[in-house]
Amino acid sequence: MGVVATTGFLYEHLADELGQAIDRGALRAGDRLPSVRRLAQERSVSVATVLEAYLRLENAGLIEVRPKSGHFVRRRQALTAEPRTPRACS
């Protein structure tokens, strides 16, 4: 699942790359993502770029923020089937 269409913005590229890592299982549910500052330093981007990428992933339901703990990969919600309507037996 690509989180965003790539239009050239760094935060979109970063969000897409992290989203793909989650999709292929390189980042699993419960895994802690790098801190905003650390990822910004590792990728040579601004803190604002990482924050925007993380916000996009959060809005897509892929990660969650835990106050004073960081950003974590969310558990995937299983798709629920439509409730079946009981049919009358004849």
Image (spheres, grey):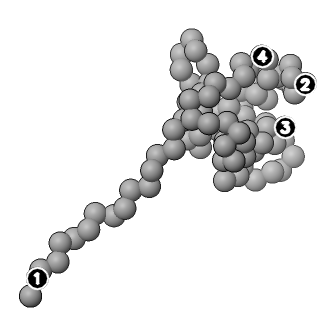
Q: What's the distance in space between the residues labelled 3 and 2, CA to CA? A: 11 Å
Question: Of the residues under marks 4 and 3, which one precedes in the sequence?
Answer: 3
Q: Residues within 10 Å of mark 2 (few under 14, many from 20)?
A: few
Q: What's the distance in space between the residues labelled 1 and 3, CA to CA? A: 59 Å
Name which residue lies at 22% across and 70% down.
85
Question: Of the residues under marks 3 and 2, which one precedes in the sequence?
Answer: 3
Q: What's the distance in space between the residues labelled 4 and 1, CA to CA? A: 63 Å
Q: Which residue is mark 3?
A: 10
Mark 1 touches mark 3? (CB < 8 Å): no
Foreground label between 2 and 1: 1
Mark 4 touches mark 3? (CB < 8 Å): no
Q: Quadrant of residue 26?
A: top right
Is residue 59 something one can see in this rendering? no
As shown in the figure, which amino acid type bears the numbered disc 2?
Ser
As shown in the figure, which amino acid type bears the numbered disc 3?
Leu
Position of the C terminus, as image quadrant, is bottom left
Provide residue 30's location: percent of width, then percent of height: 56, 29
As shown in the figure, which amino acid type bears the numbered disc 1?
Cys
Q: Which residue is mark 4?
A: 37
Provide residue 11's location: percent of width, then percent of height: 79, 36
Vertical arrangement, residue 78 with respect to residue 48, above or below: below
